[in-house]
């Protein structure tokens, strides 16, 4: 059966890497460090997937812009202290190998910085599985379409042949804004009812469900 999608673009945090809880804790601890009330878990989760400064500005809306870099520095301190302990969701390496074996081109579009993504790719050993990657500090942050548009242009694939997979509404709206279809995964940062409001083609509650859907529909 011919493939429906040539290019599959994955989000990173909460989609491939089990990192949402660590991001939430790092945001909260960073707030405590600089003496401002930390956001609750739901608020902190809601900003996962955005570029760091944008995420922190939304998580702590009363913080003056002049202190955003101070908060970002403390966030990086807490996240980087433990990021080497984070693991991929079970089944992710096998899923990526399966997709590559069936001729799909794989890419990443993430709210992480380039330094952060390269560090994560090194820790996980996934770098060789992706033909290209885009990060929020070298493009425009989600939900703008720029990262996906740039990946499609670089790799030579059309929107109709590109699928985005992510765990946040930011991922799904990025796909929509780029003219692509998307699959939501509900095992990451955002709850299913919010993901469905963004109109994904399908949703998966586990990597196993995602693998099965992709084998049938990708």
Image: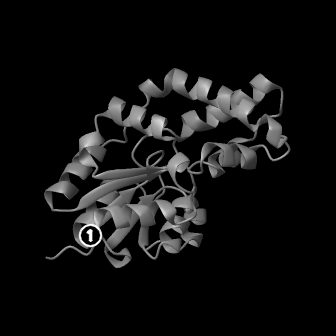
**Where residue 186 sits in the image (x, y, percent)?**
48, 56
**Residue located at (20% from left, 73% from top):** 3
Residue 204: in sight, yes or no?
no
Q: Choose between 97 and 65: the one closer to the eye.
A: 65
**Drawn side of residue 196 relative to residue 15, left or right:** right
Residue under pointer 1: 218
Secondary-structure class at tag 1: loop
139 relative to 125, above or below: below
Question: Residue sitting at 46 percent across and 57 percent down?
Answer: 166
At a point 81% along the width and 42% down the height, the residue shown is 65
Q: Which residue is painted at 41% across and 64% down in the image?
A: 164
Q: How many labels does the image show?
A: 1
Q: The N terminus is located in which quarter?
A: bottom left
Label 1 neighbour load within 10 Å: few <14, some 14-19, many 20+: many
Residue 6 visible in the current orientation: yes
- Using the rendered view, name the quadrant where residue 91 is placed: top left
- Classify 34 as above or below 108: above
Residue 33: where, in percent of width, then height? 75, 23
User: Can you give x and y, in whole percent of width and height, for residue 60 in the image?
Assistant: 78, 43
Question: Is residue 105 positioned above or below 30 on the image?
Answer: below
Residue 192 horizontal/vertical position (percent): 54, 61
The colour scheme of the drawn protein is one colour
The answer to whether residue 87 is above or below residue 3 is: above
Left or right? Give the position of 35 relative to 88. Answer: right
206 vs 63, nearest the viewer? 63
Which quadrant does the C terminus fall into?
A: bottom left
Q: Is residue 46 left or right of residue 130?
A: right
Locate residue 215: give its quadrant. bottom left
Q: Is residue 60 left or right of residue 135?
A: right
């Amino acid at each position: 059966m011919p493939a429906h999608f040539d290019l599959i673009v994955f989000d990173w945090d909460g989609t491939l890497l089990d990192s949402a809880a660590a991001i939430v804790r790092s945001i909260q601890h960073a707030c405590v460090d600089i003496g401002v009330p930390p956001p609750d878990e739901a608020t902190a989760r809601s900003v996962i997937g955005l570029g760091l400064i944008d995420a922190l500005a939304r998580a702590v809306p009363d913080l003056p812009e002049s202190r955003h870099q101070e908060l970002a520095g403390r966030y990086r301190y807490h996240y980087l202290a433990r990021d080497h302990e984070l693991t991929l969701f079970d089944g992710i390496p096998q899923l990526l190998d399966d997709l590559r074996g069936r001729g799909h081109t794989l890419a990443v579009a993430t709210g992480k910085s380039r330094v952060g993504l390269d560090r994560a790719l090194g820790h996980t050993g996934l770098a060789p599985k992706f033909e290209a990657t885009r990060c929020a500090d070298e493009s425009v942050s989600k939900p703008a379409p720029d990262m996906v548009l740039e990946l499609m242009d670089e790799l030579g694939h059309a929107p109709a042949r590109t699928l985005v997979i992510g765990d946040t509404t930011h991922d799904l709206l990025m796909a929509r804004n780029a003219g692509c279809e998307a699959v939501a995964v509900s095992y990451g940062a955002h709850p299913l009812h919010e993901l469905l409001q963004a109109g994904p083609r399908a949703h998966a509650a586990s990597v196993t469900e995602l693998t099965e859907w992709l084998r049938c529909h990708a």
